[in-house]
Image (cartoon, rainbow, N blue to C red):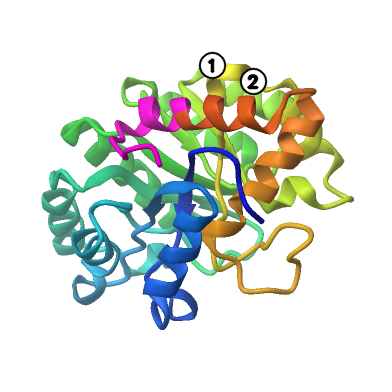
Amino acid sequence: MNSQGNLIDTHCHLDDPKLAAHLPAVLHRAKQSGVIGMVTIGCAKSLGNLDSAIDVARRHPDQVRATTGIHPHDAEHQSDALFEALEELARDPLIVAVGETGLDFFYEYASREAQLESLRRNIAIAKRVDKPLIIHTRDAASETLEVLKEEHARDVGGIIHCFSEDAHFAKASLDLGFVASFSGIVTFKNASEVREAARKQPEDAILVETDAPYLAPVPKRGSINEPSFVGYTAAMIAELRGQTTEELHAITTQNARRVLNLSFESL
């Protein structure tokens, strides 16, 4: 797909082996598709892999920024030493947000108690380094909102990534300072509530992402997802909202620049 605008993929995992093995080609295809920048997400499981995401940004600073955080799946791995190192790394200028962090009560690869503690500690770090949060939430909508409110996460705000809830949750999270980033899920026929949320989301609070290498959008279902596919998601959202693709590209890119303080140059 030849995207017609300057899109930003606000959430991908370029350090995943499925993409890292041929990263130069992935980045080239992204640029050819009109993607001016990508945010690769750091998911620290140990001190040993803490730099995995930012290393990609260090090698490709013209196209990539990074985040750092502890994913809810990995919350059992948290330790004081890991959080201390994470906070130090979060101060790096190439790190634009803390996360992804959050709650996943669908898989529960980590206990709920560990996830809640990790989320609160990630929020505290974000507030100390004054950077926004990247929030993952699945089957934990009310609990996520409760923690964001209790911990005053509004002080830094951030993104509900891979938005998979309904318009009510989108409004509630926006009231707490969190915009919605929509992935390829919005192109799935059975995602009626997500589509409705994308249609209703205020213009200044909508982003697009791939979550690559996962969740490839229609018509790429079954493929390894990559940032060059983000245009399909943008096209679906534009159709839902009655906007042109050019308008939707401009809106989401402006929002990404503002929310994540990005400075990628237009093509």
Label 2 secondary element: helix
Residue 173 drawn at (x, y percent): 56, 26
- Residue 40 vs residue 190: left or right? left
How many residues crowd around disc 1 within 10 Å: few (fewer than 14), some, or many (20 or more)? few
Magenta span contains residue 145: no
Q: Amino acid at mark 1?
A: Asp
Q: Which residue is mark 2?
A: 171
Q: Which residue is mark 1?
A: 175
162 shown above or below 237: below
Label 1 secondary element: helix
Residue 199 drawn at (x, y percent): 76, 26
Are the residues at dot 2 and dot 1 in contact (C-beta closer than 8 Å)?
yes
Depth check: give the residue in front, 11 or 153. 11
Q: Where are the magenta residues, as a range?
A: 254-267
**Residue 187, visible in the rendered structure:** yes
Magenta span contains residue 264: yes
Depth check: give the residue in front, 12 or 30. 30
Q: In the picture, which quadrant includes the N terminus? A: bottom right
